[in-house]
Every structure is written in structure tokens, then in C-alpha cells.
Image: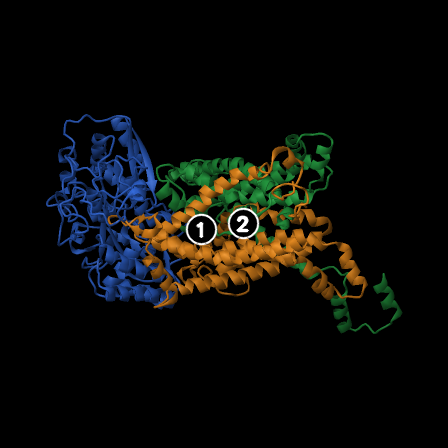
Chain colours: A green, B blue, C orange
Amino acid sequence: MSDATLTRERPIAVTPARKATGWLRNPWRKPRILQAVTLGYLAWSILPVIIAIVFSFNDGRSRSTWQGFSMRWWYQDPFDSVWHDQALRTAMFQTFKLSTLTVLFAVPLGTAFAIGIDRWHGRPATTANFFMLFSFVMPEIILGVSLFLLFTNLLENAVHLGTAAQFLGLVTFQMSYPVIIVRARLLSIGPEYEEAAMDLGAPPRQSLRRVLLPLLGPAILASAALVFADSVDDFVTVRYLSGPASSEPLSVKIYSLARAAATPAVNAAATIMLIATLGVVALAWFAFRRITRGRGEEMSAAGLAEF
Amino acid sequence: MSAHPRRRPSALNRRDFLRKSFGAAVALPSAAAILAACSKPGTTSSGGGGGTTGNGARVLARPDDPVTLPMTQDPIPTDTPIEGGTLNVYNWDAYMYKKVLSAFEDEFGVSVQWTTFNNMEEGIQKLTSGQVEADVFFPTTDYVARLVEAGLLQPLNHELIPNMPANVWPVFNDPGPYYDLGWRYTIPYTIYTTGVAYRRDRLDDADAAAKGYELFFDSLFKDEVSYYDSYRDALGMMLLRDGVMDPNSDDPAAIGKAKDAILEMINANGARLTINGAYAKLPEGEFGIAQSWSGDIVGAKYYLPKGTPEDVLGYWYPPDGKGLVGNDTIVIPSGAKSPRLAHEFLNFFLDEHWGYLNFADWNGYQPPFTSIVPDKLVSDGVVLPTLSSAVVNEKSFTTGYIQGELSADTDALWLDAWNEIQAGG
Amino acid sequence: MASDAGAVTGRPDGKTPKNRSEISYGRWYWPSFTFPGILWLAALFILPFYVVLSVAFGTVDPLFRLPLPVYQPWWWSVDTFRTTFEKFTSGSHIYLDPLTRTLVYVGLASLICLVLGYAVAYYTARYAGRWKWLILVLLISPFWISYLMRIYAWQSLLQPDGYINDALGVFGVAPIIWVGRPITVVLGLVYGYIPFMILPLFGFLDRIDQNLLEAGRDLGASSYQTFRRVTLPLSKPGILAGLVIVSLPMFGDYYTNNLLGSTNTSMYGNLIDSAVGQAGQGPEAGSLVLILIVLVMIPMLYYLRSTRRQTEAA
């Protein structure tokens, strides 16, 4: 390497100061600082969650002082454990229900929108795109409060607060994710494949179905996984749009209990949802891998970056 | 927002006051009507809903100015058969003992459906809009008059609730509570006082009694003070501390002083506004002083961590009984599907045995029964001996200061002060 | 990419057909795909804004003082809006503090997100080597671990008897009350939103052609210079995107403060949240929401304009 050659040809006394600056200046050195920062960040990011999971097995009521191992909050405690607490179970079920429904609607709507907006140009398209992007970065409280006011005033007979309202709110909020991810993917695919298909005689509708959609498969899957995870986590919108206690998903329950009197049962319930979400994401990942076998496509992360 | 002893901070829902069913006579225009209307909403002169006082001139009930609510309809006849099926109960979360509910279900062969609300505004709205169908409802006293005016409640048939005169304090029976003379629409559910809870391992009783409300400002407990995140209770207690013995004060100066006091305790002494400070965090040791409802501190013993002795909890209330006091009520909405069964439900909760069990084994919030004697509570182990001041007796109900309904303008004053506190002062 | 090139073909409306689908199915074939989405947004995104306007400029019912929206613009009353606005600007401007605090917290948190996030993204993109995928998975994990659970976990650690104080105790530091301090809230915001910064940055940095960097080095630039003159400019769009995605939602955050802060650290979102729950304050809540929309719209428009300029230049 040129660097090494240079240093060999110029014998200089290697003092400690030289060593330090030399180390700093060496462009090929291992980036210890960055490495430490990254590892530190990962620990900061993940460790609290691991500790929270561990504490779900705490013997006492505390979430911060370890008092021994027990399955009390999972199924033993006859009133407050996850197994026995009807309210927590209802909340978990509600979370699952809402998230699944949201994915089923948001992903097709978003994907269709992305395909359409990609090929449509002009002022109306830009406006539509603007609103879609706005719904993406807008603080969620705006959407939550606006929908709340909508459902309690203008549409109060049509839609009651509760699961229906929460579902509508969630899809509205989540729709922008598939749009962004699929759009990014579309940009990187380009029109060549479809054109090739049509050159070979496929009618446009078929080329859409058999060429474009499969190509978009990974992006659609990624956005489905993301929408699911984000819906499980969503809480601002669903909280404002909750109706009876049975319509409160787990995220809202965690929030209320965190401000009231949380027991490790909440940790246990959150862990269950985490595992469920992990399961869904893993499913999507495997499907993703199957589709992109060997094609070495970009991950959804890069797709997000395209935006 | 106005909190309640059992309110857990949770979902907010507000719905417009829609004049649906319940035979309401208040004629506020509906959304569709507004669009077609020729007059501006809110200015239509609508006749008061069956009330004799008319719109906006309603008398606010006070202990020294009691109110007889108008009869908006006749109570159900005594010989109405008891309905079967389901009884819809609309109540705060965790406010009733499931065992008592099961007993009720067994006795009448029905099933009880318990729908919850998280704050009173939410409860009121869902009820008025018809989203929740309730046979039984648990409002706070300041809403009773308004609910009656809106035609949302039905009067009770006293013959069907014999436990009321039999078991409940005379002050609720005859002449009846100030907000509902003659108990036409309500029965009391729980009564409570609002005082100062403290850790007896940090402060002895004599000291606590000497300092009283000043404990919130005591630098000994810097950063360990909890105060209720509820504007009526928060400002109300400071009004009492300032010597303004009126928790319904409409004096802007007094309210301003109360607000400044709260800001002082937050800024100078690190106080925090919470809802769980008394029943959950004080036993855990996170707080040393907490504004507390009596039921909260009685129930706090369940939150003591392992190894902490029970006598560590203390409660101070003005010994002359001149502190904040309040009660909850049970009512029957006018649209109830099973009113006869609802009457039985009210009667059931006034039963000496079941009402007591509800309190002793679950609630911590005491029902106003004549059979409940403070000494018995302590000897039964329901209330810790160190917390005997948390037991409410009939006298404190007459000497104490009760939070009542505020007029719109006064309420705005209070809320403005509260907003300033919440915005960080 | 198909561009808005001027008409060359002899179509009467002067628009070039973009592709063969258009030729077969007409000009509205592709746009029609967007219609379900547009309809949904119109009904559940745009319409609610009108309701917010109606509530903010409306009134309250006299009995229970619930918000009474006024849908006809000619009856709109700006009284409440003016009062709310004045709470920012005049008198004891009680709302100004939360607003400034929000700006400061969001600014600080975004900055920390940027610096920390960039470092992590940079490392992962350039140096992680065979650990890259593992680190990436770990970086993505916050997306599917509920934000609430993470903040809740954090809250447990920050309790007076939590592990953070325990760890500090090893160094002889007395237990600190973490909840209620501005630093806790700012770090909480960082904790919640930093994944949204790292991933776009990573995407950008990952794509930077390694050759460009090597060329810089070969030409004698130090690693710092390479970074400053090659990497940084190339990652500018990523930085901008990350900043927008991270900072704008933070403006409406109220739950981080509710869980980790106190009234002294209250933010703009808390103002809205308490107003929505109070009797008689519906119009005020609506006014606050409107002001927030305007506040957020400005950087958003700026960002869109700058990215459009970029894509047009590309």
C-alpha cells in the first residue's frame, strides 16, 4: 500500500505523539470510536427491553427491583396475571385484530396509490402526493384529535368510537408507509420490465399482474410487516378513538397502567405482543427471502431512504 | 381534568351532546339541522328540559342552598315485574367488587354487563349520545342536576329500595342530600374525604398534625411530594389552606392565590401531579407526602412492597372536620331497559352485607352505612389502625366542604388557572 | 423516468402518452389507481381538518359545555382562537413556555439523533463487515418493539430504585430523581425517534460508491477530508430526510412527557391533550391543533420544495 511504502521510505522517530496522530490520521485503521458508539447505542436501544422482559418474571410487584423469579404475572396470580386478567387479554386480542385489519386495507390502498402516483404527472398528482406525504410526517396527535372531533360531531351517528373508528384512523395514518416504500421500489425498478413484457405481447393488465406486482413483492411484504408492527405500537390515534374499555388495545393499556399502577403483568403482556410481532415480521422476512432468492435486492431500509 | 377517586388516566372520549332518545326536551339543533337552519347554533332559545329553572338560570346546588330536582317523569310502578336477561352497568373501572356482582347475578338469575368509562366527561357523553345503553350509572354529584335537566334520569321508586332508609345515614334520607332533596334520583355509593397522606417512617403523627397542608411545601420532602392531577381537588385544597373555606369559589383573586401556591409547591419543592401518587407510589416509597382521597390510602395497603410494615402509612385530615369531602351516586337513566332490575341493583349495593363487602374487600371507599363504625373497621382489619382518620363519619359530611357544580364562568376561571399550572407555570 | 416533456406527437391536448398502457386504456388508467387512496384521505384526513376548523371557530353547548362545531363559515367566531393565540403572545403568555420548550427539546433531540444516528449509520454502512446484517436487524428491531414498551422499560430503569440509579450508586452518586427533568424528556425523545434517523441515513450511506471514497483517499485526502468533501455532501439528502422524519412528529409528542416528565417539562402536545379532555375547552383544543398544523406545514413545504428541486435536477 502506498501509505506503508511512504512510511518505510521516510524513517522518522516514532514518538508517542507521532503515534497518536498517526493513529488518528491512518485512514485504514479500525474505527474504534465509531464502533464503541454503535455498540453503545445498540445496548442503549435493546437492553431496556430485555430488562423489561426479564422483569415480567419478577416475584414482587415492582418493575425496578428484582425480587426473585416467578411465573406469577404470567399465569399464577389468580387476578392480575395475564392468563387470568380478562382486561389484558381483551386488550391483546384487540391489538391483534386492529393490526391485522389495518394491514389488509392499508397495504393495498397504499400500493395502488404508489403505482398510480408514479405514472401520473401534473398538478393534481403533486397535490395528492403532497397530502400523502403530509400524512406521513404530521404529528400523530393532529390526526388523532381531528378524527376524534370528526367521529364525535359530524359522523357521530355513522361511526361510533371504538373498533370501527380506530380501524379507520389507523389505516389513514398507516397508508403512507406502503406508498413510500413501494414508490421507492418502483423508482428503482423502472419501466423496462413492463415494457419488455408488453413488447412480448402481454396486455397491460397482465403485465401489471404478472410482472410488476411480483417485482414489487418484497416492497409490499416489507411494508406489510412495517404497518403491522407500527399498528401494534400505535397509541395516540387509537386512544382518542377508543370506545368502551373492551376496545382499548394493549398500547393504550400499557400507557394507562404506566401512569397508574403497573405490575409486571404489563411487562408480560407486552412481551407476548413483542413475540407476536416478531413472528409476523419473521414470516414476512422468510417470504421476502423466498421471493428474492438470489436476487440480492435492497432491504426495505434502503427503500425508505429513497424517500 | 376533573378526576375521580377511581379514575385511572386513560382514554379520552368526548362526544357532542346530542339530543337523542331518553325523551330529552332540550332542543339543541343536530348537525343536519344546523346546515339548514337559519339561526346560529347556541343562540336558539330552547325551553329548558323539563326543568323549572329554564336555560342558563339553573340554581347550583350547595349544602346551604339545597335543590329539589324536578320530576321529569313518574317513577316505575312498584308492581313492575323484575326483568330478566342482562343488566347494563356503566361505571368506572375497578370500582365494584366482582364477587358482589356475581352474588347479584345468582340471586336474580341475570347477568351483569359492566361497561367502563375513564373520566366523567366521557361517561356523560357516551350516555347522552346513546352510544352506551345503561340501566345503572354512577355520576358524580355535580352532574346530577344537569342530567336531570336534560331528561336523562328517571326518578326512583322509594318503595323498591328499602335498604336506603334502613341502612344509610339519615343525612341522605331525610331531608336528603343537598343536590337531590328527597333523594328523588340518586342513592349514595361511596363517601370520601380528601386529605394528606404521609409516610410515618419519615414523619411522626404529631408533626404531621401540626403542619397539615403545609407538608406539601416542607423542604424535608423536596421532590417527594405528589399532588392530584385534578383541577377541582388541586385548587380546592389550596383554597382551604389559604383560609378560603369554599371549594366552589368564584373569586378570581382566591383562585389566583391557590394557583400560585400549587406553582410554588411544584417549582420550589419539586411536587409532581399524579393520580397514583397516594395509593401506589406512596407505599412504594417514591413519595413521602401525597394528596390523597381517603379510599386511596385505605386501599394502599395492597401496594406495600414485601417487607414494608403496614404502619408506615398515615393520613391527616383537619381534626375539626373542616376539610374536603365528597360522595358518588348511583342513578338510573331514563332510557334504561330494565329499570325494575336496576332498582334491585341499587338496593343490593345498599345491603349491609354486600355493600360492606364491596368496600372492605375491594374498594377501600366507604359506603355511608349506619352500621359501619370506625372502631369496627379497625378491629376488623379493614382499615389499618394508623389510618383511622381516613374513616368518614356522618359528622364530617356535615362539617366538611363539598365540591359542587360550578357555573360556566367560574369553571372557566378554574380551568384557566389549571391550564397555567399544566403549561409549566 | 418518464418526464413531463413537451408534446411532440400530434395529440390535440398536447400531452404525450407515457406508455402503452395509457395508449390502450386511456389517460386515466394509472391515475385511477390512486383514487381509492385519495378518496380515503379526503374523507378521513382532509374532512377532519374542516371539522377542526368548525370546532375551533365554533362554540360550546350551554349545558354540558361540550364542543359544538359550526359548519357554516359565515358564522365562525374567532374569539376563542384569538384568546388562545393571546395565550402565546400577550398577558402572562402562559402558552409561550411550552412552545419554546417544545422547540428547544425538538431541536436538541433532533440534533442528538443526527449526530448519534449518523455515527451509527456510518459505522454500519462502512465498517461493519460481516456483522452488518446482524447490526441491521438489531437497528430495525425498535420498529417492531412497541415504542411504548421501550419507554415503559426506560421508565422502570429511571425509577428512584431503578438500575440507572443503582449503577450510578456504584460510583458513589446519590439517587437522582430522573422523572421530570428536561434531560430525561429530551433523551426519551431521542430514544423513541432515532431509529427513524438511522435507517434512511444508512440507506444513503450504504449506497455511496466505495470507489469514490477510495479515490479521495488515493488522491491524498485525509479521512476527515474525505468525509467532509465526499461523504457528507452525498449524504445531504439523507440527512434532510432523516431530520424531517424525526423532528416533525416530535412536535406533537405528549406521551413522552407524560411518562418521563412533569408539568415543568410540558410540551405543545400536552396543551392539546389536556384541552381535549376538559369541558368547555373544545374550541381551544381545535385552535391549538390549527396552530400546530401551520407550524408543521412550513418546514414540510420547504422540505418538499427542496426535494422536488433535487429530483428535477437529477
Question: Where residue A274 sits: x, y (%)?
Answer: 54, 42
Give the chain letter at badge 1. Answer: A
User: Given the current orientation, which residue lies at the most extreme right position?
Assistant: A9
Judge by depth and name the residue closer to the eye, B198 or B24: B24
Q: Is residue B314 left or right of residue A292?
A: left
Q: Is residue B44 visible?
A: yes
Image position of A109 with respect to C95: above or below = above
Q: Is residue B386 left or right of residue A64?
A: left
**For the residue labelled by badge 2, is the local secondary structure a helix, a strand or a loop?**
helix
Q: Amino acid at mark 2?
A: Phe
Q: Amino acid at mark 1?
A: Ile
Q: Is residue B278 visible?
A: no
Image position of A136 with respect to B158: above or below = below
- Count the marks: how many? 2
Question: Which one is in front in this view, the residue at disc 2 or the one at disc 1?
Answer: 2
Q: Rounded to the nearest whole Å, what is the CA distance between mark 2 and mark 1?
A: 19 Å
Please tell me in which quadrant of the rendered image residue B111 appears: top left
| Residue underneath mark 2 | A130
Give the chain letter at badge 2. Answer: A
Q: Is residue C72 left or right of residue B395?
A: right
Question: Where residue B310 sits: x, y (%)?
Answer: 34, 51
Q: How dense is the environment of label 2, judged by Cα within 10 Å: few (below 14), some, or many (20 and up)?
A: some
Image position of C259 with respect to B261: above or below = above
The answer to whether marks 2 and 1 sit on the same chain is: yes
Question: Where residue A178 sits: x, y (%)?
Answer: 57, 42
| Residue underneath mark 1 | A141
The residue under the point 72% across, 39% down is A192
| Disc number for residue A156 | none
